[in-house]
Image (cartoon, coloured by chain):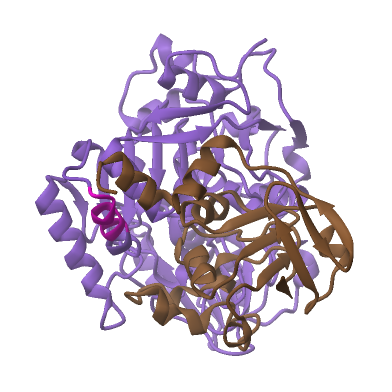
Amino acid sequence: MGHTLVEKIIGNKVGHEVKPGDIVTVDVDWCMIDDIMVPFAVQKFEEMGFKKVAKPEGVVLIYDHFLPATQVDDSRHFRVGDEFADKYGIKNVHRTDGICHQLMTEAGYVKPGDIAFGTDSHTVTYGCVGAFSTGIGYTEMAGILGTGQLWIKVPETIKVEIEGTLHGNVTSKDIILRIIGDLTASGATYQAIEFTGSTVDAMSVASRMTMSNMSVEAGAKCGLFAPDEKTCDYCKIPFDDKLKELRSDNDAKYSKILRYKAEDFKPVCACPSLVDNIKPVKELKGTKVNQVFIGSCTNGRLEDLRAAATILKGKHVAPFVKLIVTPASRKIYREALADGTLEILSDAGAIITTPGCGLCCGRGGGILSDDEVVVATNNRNFLGRMGTSKVQIYLASPVTAAATAIAGEIVEG
Amino acid sequence: MSKIWKLDNDIDTDIILPTEYLAFETVQEMKPYAFSPLRPDLAAQIQPGDMIVAGNNFGCGSSREQAPEVVKALGISCIVAKSFARIFFRNAINNGLLLIEQPDLYDEVAEGDEAEVIPGKEIIVNGKSYPIASLPENLTEILEAGGLVKAMRKRNGLD
């Protein structure tokens, strides 16, 4: 019997074959702790009575949710993180560089075949380079900090095959939203999702990140792409024989297989207030919006900002719409500055904010109040996520978001 | 006997505790805001020993461990749902909060009903028995130690 990609990643790490349902203890390559969770992880680590961090070179602290601080207690989190890093020899601390899930691959930490855990559910993002990565709580993180290990249950795999060429106004965001709608918000719980097919092969790593990132919205433990030449270019490593083996065998066993034709995908939105409440953008025409948000670890990359700029070039957002653009990292911000993307967006009336989680987690600039409507490129439209519980959040692609900002109502790009 | 509070499908972690309350230093400060986007009065109504019965996918969403911590701090003795989200499940066990998957209970009980929970065996409500499974051994060990912090303290020779 062949193995799926996730079985191979975990099997390589533990040194023997594994099958779904096996409970194994793995050595952890990377621990990511974000600013919200730092003080809690540190407190648990100390309560557990550890004297040192097992593998400080594998720990990365990233300040992003509270940056720049908006409430008086927020900076305590940065201070606790800095003190912890100093005390235990943690050198990888990103204080102002961008969103954790962007930086973990962009800054060169997570590589194909690695195992990573983070204190944020969107840690699944690193599946875009063929790594097993998933979110955990701060108590488990404290345990990994002390022991370097964690137990996991080997998941079954749902295979998603997509073949063909996408329409021009359809992005990987529309694909993953449709898949979440089809699977439902709990349809992949405890399972891995593996994305395959010619459409996926043709995608940039940035587009794959969007899909890995949102796999958790279907409940998945991880959302994986087998590494290829593009992955290795992005990770700045050679595509060697070992990595060429890091893909599912032809006779691997799946819990479910979903097959799609790329041509069948349309621009869609996740409508209030569930990620699996998916409707075609065309059916939402006429829905007036107060604000549009383009950013986050889901869609704050250079290709997303460029896609928005292509639509907004020479135009202006509707007078009653606030368009907030938040690049996912400093590197992306600089690249978008250098190639003129930010200038186009600014000319069109966008408010461009500092890289970070910003509005996505309801902490940064742009939170909304009762009955306001926002179209946003991030990953969650939960009740109260971006302001009061009566805010209507529609999740969409950067293409849909940009077109909507101009029209002042939800429209296709 | 435990009084049942009934919640719906897909109760996410932003409902259990919104992001704006995550930075409180103690879980005691978070307690009044539990479930506030959905039911602002619920946290004040819950009494120690009560239980929650919910539908599918309880605890979906973020990694925030404040979610199971605040539920436990309210005195909830266990949560019975059709299914749980993965991260919430691990976080709850690591905090010594009992979670039970049961497919039928949610559809057949009402808020305010009284339940008796016999771990690993059954839940009895309105005279009817609902069978429940045992947890895997490694999770039972963490739960019996009183959570992962206590299990690690034991490992480190402290307790």
Classify the position of the C terminus of chain A by image quarter. bottom right
Image position of B134 (left or right of A237): right
x, y (%) of residue A233?
36, 28
Q: Is residue A141 above or below residue A393?
A: above
x, y (%) of residue A165?
68, 36
- In the image, B107 versus A309, the foreground residue is B107
Magenta: predominant secondary structure element? Answer: helix
* Chain A: drawing colour: purple
Classify the position of the N terminus of chain A by image quarter. top right
- Chain depicted in brown: B
Residue A202, quarter of picture: top right
Count of residue discs: 0
| In magenta segment, residue B150 | no
Residue B20 visible (yes or no) = yes
x, y (%) of residue A250?
67, 13
- In the image, A38 versus A24, the foreground residue is A24
Residue B104, quarter of picture: bottom right
| In magenta segment, residue A48 | yes
Q: Is residue A6 above or below residue B27?
A: above
Q: Is residue B50 above or below residue A412?
A: below
Residue at x 27%, y 73% (from the top left corner) = A68
Residue A166, quarter of picture: top right
x, y (%) of residue A15?
43, 14
Residue at x 47%, y 52% (from the top left corner) = B94
- In the image, B95 versus A169, the foreground residue is B95
Image position of A59 (left or right of A320): left
Residue A412 visible (yes or no) = no
Image position of A284 (left or right of A9): right
Per the rendered image, the range of residues in magenta is A41-49
Residue at x 56%, y 66% (from the top left corner) = B13
